[in-house]
Amino acid sequence: MSTTVTPSRPGPAPGLPRAGRTAQRRRGQRSRSDLLPALLFVGPATIGFLVFYVWPALRGVYYSFTDFSVLSPPTWVGTENYQDLIQDELVWNAFGVTAQYVLINIGAQTVLSLGLAVLMHRLTTSMAVRGALLLPFLVANVVVALTWFWMLDYQIGIVNGGLDWLGMDRIAFFGDSQWAIPTIAMINVWRHMGYTALLIFAGLQTIPTHLYEAASLDGSGEVRSFFTITLPLLRPVLAMVLVITVTGSFQIFDTVAVTTAGGPVNATRVVYYYIYELAFVRFDFGYASAISVVLFLVLASVAFAQIKLLRAGESDLS
Amino acid sequence: MPRHVRTMAALAVLPLAALAACSGGDSGSGSDAAPAGDTLSYWLWDTNQLGAYQACADAFTEESGVSVKIEQYGWDDYWSSLTNNFVAGNAPDVFTNHLSQYPQFAAQDQLLDLSEQVAADGVDLDQYQDGLADLWVDQEGARYGLPKDWDTIAIFYNSTMLADAGLTPEEMSVLEWNPTDGGTYEAAIASLTVDANGVHGDEPGFDKDDVEVYGLALAGAGGAFGQTEWSMYAMSNGFEYSDQNPWGTRFGYDSPEFQEALTWWRSLIEKGYMPSFEIATSGVSIMETYGAGKAAMVTEGSWNTNAYMTLEGVETAIAPTPVGPTGERASLFNGLADSVWAGTDNPDAAWQWVSFLGSADCQDIVAEQAVVFPAVQSSLDKAVEAFEAKGYDVAPFTVHVEEGTTHLAPIAENWAELNSLVTAAGERFLSFQRDADVYSEANAQVNALFE
């Protein structure tokens, strides 16, 4: 997850004179004196961005055209990695599995957090209740994954014990290829939905209450108000939340690494895990970089499409 | 791979108090002693062994004046940390190395060739258990490590369940196995299996779809190594991993000896004596499953002896792996060694430390801790005694060394690719998506890696 900071540009000074050398010079002086503090504020972030994001990303793109095993210098191989990639069944499998994960994860998470956010907004003002929703998010990913891994164990897990007690069949949550991805997706829904709900809740607070009052005077119920007022006015916030959560969701790694390690067979070998295996287990950093570049392009197009389709830049309010 | 620990290994870094040691004294190693006050870094992954090697390090510092700083990372973090530190130029001077990893590091010029030092100091390579020292020599004759320990495979079983099934420990020590009907080994597994109604696997009315206690636990498909999963069956059926070892180039996963053994092994799932692949991979680990009394037998490596014997709530004993159609038992014989990083600032001191780790002096210290079996032959008795003092009869592990039924672990180039090909085949096989012929397809791909 990342936040974008748009440096605010100084607007035209009020009462700007039409022309004149003195006025122009004065404006020039103003700009110069603004420039230094501006650079001072933007500088640290820019340096970090260049050193930790742009430069590694460019290196990654370069490595994707090489055969590189880290310990010996890379050798240029042109587009060979990309040609291999198209024919690699495991790459296609990885993108398919990841897409399945994202659909389940984002679908369930968005609906549930929207519900939670509305409940928070309309039903309670208690900070304790609102804060409690955040709790799962405060637990480290790996700890969440391990805890669920234990609870969902086929033979000794409490969930299967419960299913047994209810007279239902036990389920091999992580071992059955039909169940593995939905299980991992739902674990992460559980962890992230409170956090996502909080983001949406912040959006809900921007909707003026008088709209609801007017609607209820006109005889609109809670359900109708939700679909005709809340959802349309929430659109820009929802778009932002979706861009962030979808991008994060595509990058699923830790839960897989801790529980299934890509198995059974290839059922949970998601893109990031496959990249990790290629790079850090098989030392094929060139090929792993090529897949990372493809993933980057996919994510960029998905985010772009979301922003365009959901018209994230404009609000229906006003 | 021997350390299956899935849990996030706690990163325990134990810095050794770097006290300026006293005199160099009369160091036994003939070569020029390193200047006192040097510090070496040393990495290992097994917390169980930390105490033993700390004791070795203290003795070494006493003798040479070189202090050793030991760092320990869990198995999962160990190799990626090591690689990162190779790249960063920060790797430890000396580190514990594994047979499946070192060919790759050697190919990348990260390991110091120790053959000259071994010759110059006249290290007696015959002091080690047969073959262990040869595993660390590459095809050009360069030596990348001195052996420190070894491991074999045996069966840990639940003594209480054994008595319930009407079996005796004596019967467990003479089990025989064959791929046709499974022999007395399968009979034992069957009678140890119990369904939800308390019916044993060899009794009429056994419900194989509602099993409470499995006779034999299943860890997974075992990849290309199958060390604790299937190697003891396949090799006692005449299977060889490759045409030569180390550095084989033609592999045997398409052989009938291999495929018969694995088909029998998988049949235990159909009979309800062993959990399905789905159940196995949906479980935390077989040690927890066994500890919770959901499995009566586990095939495991000697490095886990203490862990199994000290499990609470179950009473455990050890039995040797069964005798197969070849008329012999079989176990993989795997050993760790200490390697020197090529980028070390202090190759002389590093070699002295490796040489001390591989000496009877250090291995006697390790043996007394009863954690692993030392590579030096003369230290073995001390280790067995130390295990006996704890009340563990480890003869089922040492029987392979005494009877000569150890098989050196396979070492090959391209192991990472090879392993991922055979792993994928094995998981399809074990989950009944494919029959054993899937291994023949994988084997063809494996052989193609070496052409």
Image (tube, rainbow, N blue to C red):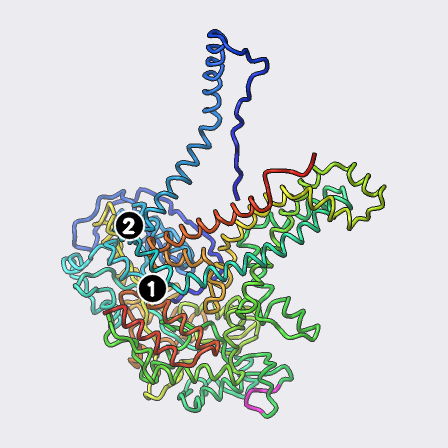
Q: Residue at x 46, y 14 (%)?
A: A28
Given the image, on which type of amino acid does mark 2 rest? Asp
Disc 1 crowd rating (10 Å Cα; few below 14, some 14-19, many 20+) is some
**Residues under labels 1 and 2: Cα distance?**
25 Å
Kindly tell me whether residue B55 is visible in this rendering.
no
Q: Nearer the viewer, residue B284 or B17?
A: B284
Task: Give the mark, 1 or 2, whose residue is nearer the N terminus.
Answer: 2
Q: Is residue A252 left or right of residue B239?
A: right
Q: Residue A156 location in percent, x, y?
A: 59, 69
Residue for badge 2: B93
Q: Secondary structure at mark 2?
A: loop
Kindly tell me whether residue B97 is visible in this rendering.
yes
Q: Residue at x 24, y 72 (%)?
A: B248
Given the image, on which type of amino acid does mark 1 rest? Ala
Question: In the image, is residue A35 above or below residue B301?
Answer: above
Q: Nearer the viewer, residue B105 or B408?
A: B105
Question: In the image, is residue B281 above or below residue A300?
Answer: below
List the single residue furthest toward the front.
A18
Q: Are marks 1 and 2 on the same chain?
A: yes
List the single residue furthest toward the left.
B120
Q: Is residue A178 left or right of residue B413?
A: right
Q: Is residue A166 left or right of residue A259?
A: right
Residue for badge 1: B416
Range shown magenta: B199-203
Q: Secondary structure at mark 1?
A: helix
Q: Residue B428 location in percent, x, y?
A: 44, 74
Quarter of the figure that contains the C terminus of chain B: bottom left
Q: Determine which quarter of the picture holds residue B328.
A: bottom left
Q: State which chain disc 1 sits on.
A: B
Q: Is residue B233 magenta?
A: no
Q: Residue at x 47, y 87 (%)?
A: B186
